[in-house]
Image (tube, helix red, strand yellow):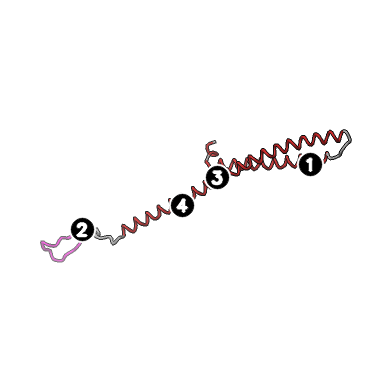
Amino acid sequence: LGAHGYARETRSTEPFSAALVLEMSLYSGGRDDAETARARAELMENQALKAKLELELRQQVLELWLEQNTLRRRLKELRAREEYRDLYLDRSRTLYELERTSDLGDAMVQVSAVRLELAKLQYQWMLNDMRLKVLTGEWLLQ
């Protein structure tokens, strides 16, 4: 916009004028291609990061699942050992009452050790189970 004051009045001079200027480049100089390439590179980087995180998550789930299987086998073993130790304790108690041997204290210690190991294993089992539920999203659905 412009306002002009002239000392002399003629037909070609106007006191007010307005103009609209539109600039459009005919050649971008590769600027658009560079921006597109940058956006595409950023997208690919984010996709690669997402894929990496998915692989790491899958690896963690696999490791926890394999550890659960190991713990399951160990749990069966400990339960069998606990059963054996209970029978051994009963045997030792009977022999102690008959005053033949005195290994009752040792048998009790063995039973306690197996039960402690079983409790630790059950705790590890529950901890792994919760980690698996968290990593697979099952925990959120509860």
- Numbered tag placed on residue 109 in the rendering: 1
Name the amino acid, label 1: Val
Nearer the viewer's eye, disc 2 or disc 4?
4
- Numbered tag placed on residue 96 in the rendering: none
Name the amino acid, label 4: Leu
Secondary structure of residue under mark 4: helix
- Numbered tag placed on residue 62 in the rendering: 3
What span is in magenta? Answer: 1-19
Q: How crowded is mark 2: few (under 14 residues within 10 Å), some or many (20 or more)?
A: few
Label the magenta part by its dominant secondary structure. Answer: loop
Residue 6 sits above or below residue 138 on the image = below
Q: Mark 2 points at which residue?
A: 19
**Label whose residue precedes the other's in the sequence (2 or 3):** 2
**Residue 49's x, y, as percent?**
46, 52
Based on the picture, tell me whether residue 8 belongs to the magenta stretch: yes
Based on the picture, tell me whether residue 66 belongs to the magenta stretch: no
**Label whose residue precedes the other's in the sequence (1 or 2):** 2
Q: How crowded is mark 4: few (under 14 residues within 10 Å), some or many (20 or more)?
A: few
Q: Which residue lies furthest to the bottom in this view?
A: 7
Secondary structure of residue under mark 2: loop
Name the amino acid, label 2: Ala
The N terminus sits in image quarter: bottom left
